[in-house]
Image (spheres, rainbow, N blue to C red):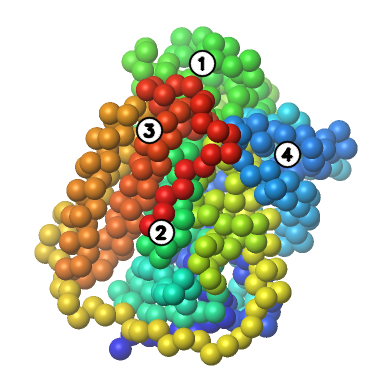
Amino acid sequence: MTKQYHFDVLIIGSGAAGLMSALELSEELSIALIAKDKFLESSSFYAQGGISAVLDSNDNFASHIADTINTACGIGNKESIRFMVENAPDAIKDLEDAGVEFSQQEGSYDLTTEGGHSSKRVAHVADKTGQSVQTSLLAQAMNKANITLFEQHLAIDLIADNNSCNGAYILDKRLNEVSTFSSHRTILATGGASKTYLYTSNPDTSTGDGIAMAYRSGCEIVNMEFTQFHPTCLFHPHAKSFLISETLRGEGAKLTLPNGKSFMQNYDERLELAPRDIVARAIDHEMKVHGFDCVYLDISFKDSNWIVERFPTITKRCHELGIDICNDPLPVVPAAHYTCGGINTDINAKSGINNLYAVGEVAYTGVHGANRMASNSLLECIVFAKSCAKHINDNFTREALKANKDWDASRVEPSKEKVLVAHLWDEVRRIMWNFVGIVRSDRRLQTAHQRLNQIHQEVDDYYSSYTLTNDLIELRNLVQTAQIIVESALSRKESRGLHYNVDHPEQTMKESNSVIIKP
């Protein structure tokens, strides 16, 4: 007999989107907030840069909207973009009310510029904005009597029938027991899928869980071919792809070859402040042409005291690794960073399944299109978490919860071949990095597609035979999400934004065309 939980709202994911959703929901609703790891282990926590918003009198909504649409390469949903941009200043105020203290300069926000922005509109907390946002929101959530926190709990599958979601089956990783969570409404806030790639700036939790679960339950998944590779992750054997914030380039840092020669002037007139897809491809090209292991990012020409004050997190981590950011250029390489596609949702975060919502990186709201503009991601989390919670609050009716069946583990046994899971996990990520990376081709995509189909069958056979583990659940989701990415990439017979195919180098498809993968 497994445990049975009953809540008005089940939120799967404890990053900025999940926490903000919980805090914005009515205190009359009982809420379960699920974290697959520790509560502060999410991509939100590691977001260094900031949150974009029109906060300066010299800036305006039209400019922020235009920059976002241009970066999205013609695929962005203009209604969603306008909604996000116009609600951005209120999002900043809400975060301040929650305890976030944005960096100030002479009594005003210390706004900075990042790639794709035509004005200074990125509010930040030094270089640890995500950490400040998440710790502040978590502190608020822990003081709410109607919110129950579940740490080290990993969702296995949604409970859905007749196009309606009724909760989820969730593994308690500490007890290795599966519980049934029944709910009137379920919100997926599980983050992205960059862990499908061998090299990523994301924490180990970014395995595409929400996307895979939603797909298996009948949701449409949109534009998964657009994986954003962050241009500058620290290249060091012990750095584990530590992110070097785009804000360094916003503050004037230059990309150079090992001989100190700059190269961005050969790729874009915006130089280091070109959108991330352009910068990442430029670095990738220089590394491949010259056979370099990395390129370099240099901000050492700035005042040392200013560098330490402006970038304390990066300075400290580099110092721990023997790199002096104040005097030496930083070795950097691109790494998978952000999933621009996801579960198809409307402006209220509703999916195509009744009672199921999706917020944050797991969702496709259309605000990123073919490429995400820097610092619009945390903003998207906050704005759409608020609209999601408002829709639930305004339309909630409490009815008798459907009795969900207990999880059935009677036909499986403990595995004696766990090495298979470890091997397939590694193989999937290498396939994605080598064949579905920054630059793609039809042949490479077809190779990935064929092998991933085989791996999917192997994982399904293993999944149906052996006792669940954390690694097996994540591998199942990883393979499913990787397949969707490849199918999406094969469907887009052009190059646009983050998807670059050498066999289809031109941008030829209709601007409004999105790739939709249906179950």
351 is higher (above) or lower (below) than 283: below
Q: What residue type is labelled 1?
A: Thr
Please state if 429 lies on the left or on the right of 335 as rendered: left
- Give the residue drawn at x 62%, y 69%: 22
Residue 215: assigned label: 2
Crowd tier of the residue under label 1, counting other residues whose Cα lies within 10 Å: few below 14, some 14–19, many 20 or above: many
* Callouts 1 and 4 close, C-beta under 8 Å: no
Give the alpha-carbon distance from disc 1 to disc 2, as whole Å. 42 Å
Which amino acid, mark 4?
Ile
On screen, residue 329 above or below 214: above
Lateral position of residue 10 relative to residue 271, left or right: left
What is the distance, in whole Å, between disc 3 and disc 2 at their CAs? 23 Å
Q: Name the residue under label 1.
A: 256
Asked if disc 1 and disc 2 are in contact, CB closer than 8 Å, the reply is: no
Mark 3 or 1: in front is 3
Across and down, in percent, residue 341 comes to: 50, 46
First in residue order: circle 3 vs circle 4: 4
Identify the residue position indicated by label 3 in the image.
437
Q: Which of marks 1 and 4 is nearer the N terminus?
A: 4
- 370 horizontally vs 501: left or right: right
Extreme residue in the front direction: 510
Coordinates of residue 65 in the picture (x, y in percent)? 73, 39
Query: Of residues 489 and 429, which is closer to you in this image?
Result: 489
Mark 3 → mark 1, Cα distance in angstroms: 22 Å
Q: Quadrant of the N terminus?
A: bottom left
Against 109, is 384 above or below?
Answer: below
Characterize the local packing of mark 4: few (<14), some (14-19) or many (20 or more) Cα atoms within 10 angstroms. Answer: many
Which label lies toward us, 1 or 4?
A: 4
Query: In the rendered image, which residue does mark 4 sit on?
Result: 65
